[in-house]
């Protein structure tokens, strides 16, 4: 009598699953670590020191600001800068005027104007300086070439370019004082990406292009998922394999 057994083999499927899980972990590590490294090179974290940018940025908010050259700044950008004439402290304000602009208050409906064009600024909120968030004080300033005129979004409390109108530059600061541009709010978690205001997009020169922070955060999240999924394959496969019924051996006489 000769006996021959045919048992269902699972080695091929097991090897493929192990290979795919290893590949998932490797790709995940690449995305996760690559996202962090690129983020560290391109971005600098900051804590908003005051409430002058409320409601856009609340006091204590954690933001990611892209390291840029001052020449890259456009109207509407929220920038981090440090000017010795303003106390040499790190500050966060919104750019409302660039070299050659005339920034004034108040135009139609009590709105801020740039070169005579009234701006819609919905980000100010109703409590940021009167109905519709208008600037309460009347002023007019011409921005020198190579400089920026900066205001806080809370126009009732912010110490900004309006507080320095008597200076030689009429409240403007050199572009060289800018060290970064705010792209994202990471805390509170509902902060998200910082929008480029539509009102400034309609002016000559438009607005700046958002940095890659969204792409980097997506890469980090995808990498973490792949690492966890790949690492979980082994224990899950073992658990499922232990529950499977063994294949019956077929016997021929």
Image (spheres, helix red, strand yellow):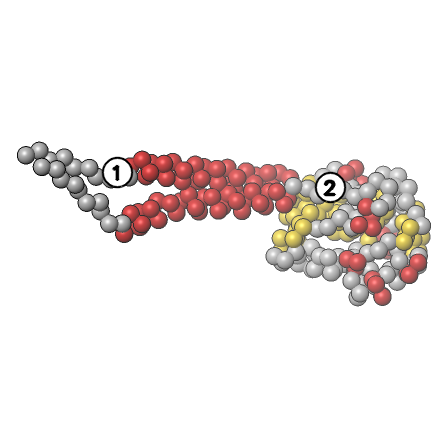
| Mark 2 residue crowding within 10 angstroms, few (<14) / some (14–19) / many (20+) | few
Q: Residue furthest front?
A: 253
209 relative to 127, above or below: above
Q: In the image, what residue occupies the spot 67% across and 50% down? A: 193
Look at mark 2 in the image and give the residue it sits on.
209
Q: Quadrant of the N terminus?
A: top left
Determine which of the numbered discs, if any, sits on residue 97 in the image. none
Q: Secondary structure at mark 2?
A: loop
Mark 1 surroundings within 10 Å by alpha-carbon count, few (fewer than 14), some (14 through 19), many (20 or more): few
Q: Is residue 226 left or right of residue 201?
A: left
The C terminus is located in which quarter?
Answer: top left
* Badge 2 vs badge 1, beta-carbon distance below 8 Å: no
Residue picked out by circle 1: 9
Q: Nearer the viewer, residue 49 or 155?
A: 155
Give the residue at x 63% y 58%.
190
Q: Is residue 84 visible?
A: no
Residue 199, given in percent of the width and then of the height, sits at 83, 50
Taking the image as shown, residue 207 lies to the left or right of residue 10, namely: right
Q: Residue furthest left?
A: 1
Using the rendered view, name the quadrant where residue 7 is placed: top left
Q: CA distance from mark 2 to mark 1?
A: 56 Å
Q: Earlier in the sequence, mark 2 or mark 1?
A: 1
Percent x, y for residue 223?
Answer: 51, 43
Q: Is residue 10 visible?
A: yes
- At 14% from the left and 35% from the top, the residue drawn is 4
């Amino acid at each position: 009598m000769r006996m021959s057994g045919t048992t269902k083999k699972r080695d091929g499927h097991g090897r493929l699953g192990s290979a795919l899980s290893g590949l998932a972990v490797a790709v995940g590590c690449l995305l996760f670590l690559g996202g962090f490294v690129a983020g560290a090179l391109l971005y600098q974290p900051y804590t908003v020191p005051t409430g002058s940018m409320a409601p856009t940025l609340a006091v204590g908010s954690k933001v990611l600001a892209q390291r840029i050259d001052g020449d890259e700044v456009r109207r509407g950008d929220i920038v981090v800068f440090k000017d010795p004439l303003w106390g040499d402290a790190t500050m966060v304000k919104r750019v409302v005027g660039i070299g050659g602009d005339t920034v004034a208050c108040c135009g139609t409906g009590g709105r801020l104007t740039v070169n005579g064009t009234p701006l819609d600024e919905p980000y100010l909120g109703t409590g940021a300086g009167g109905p519709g968030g208008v600037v309460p004080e009347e002023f007019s300033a011409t921005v020198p070439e190579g400089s920026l005129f900066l205001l806080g979004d809370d126009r009732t409390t912010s110490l900004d370019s309006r507080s320095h109108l008597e200076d030689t530059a009429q409240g403007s600061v050199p572009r060289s004082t800018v060290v970064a541009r705010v792209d994202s709010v990471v805390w509170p978690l509902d902060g998200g990406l910082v929008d480029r205001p539509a009102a400034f997009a309609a002016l000559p020169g438009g607005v700046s292009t958002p940095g890659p922070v969204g792409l980097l955060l997506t890469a980090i999240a995808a990498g973490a998922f792949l690492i966890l999924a790949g690492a979980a394959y082994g224990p899950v496969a073992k658990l499922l394999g232990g529950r499977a019924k063994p294949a019956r051996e077929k016997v021929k006489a």
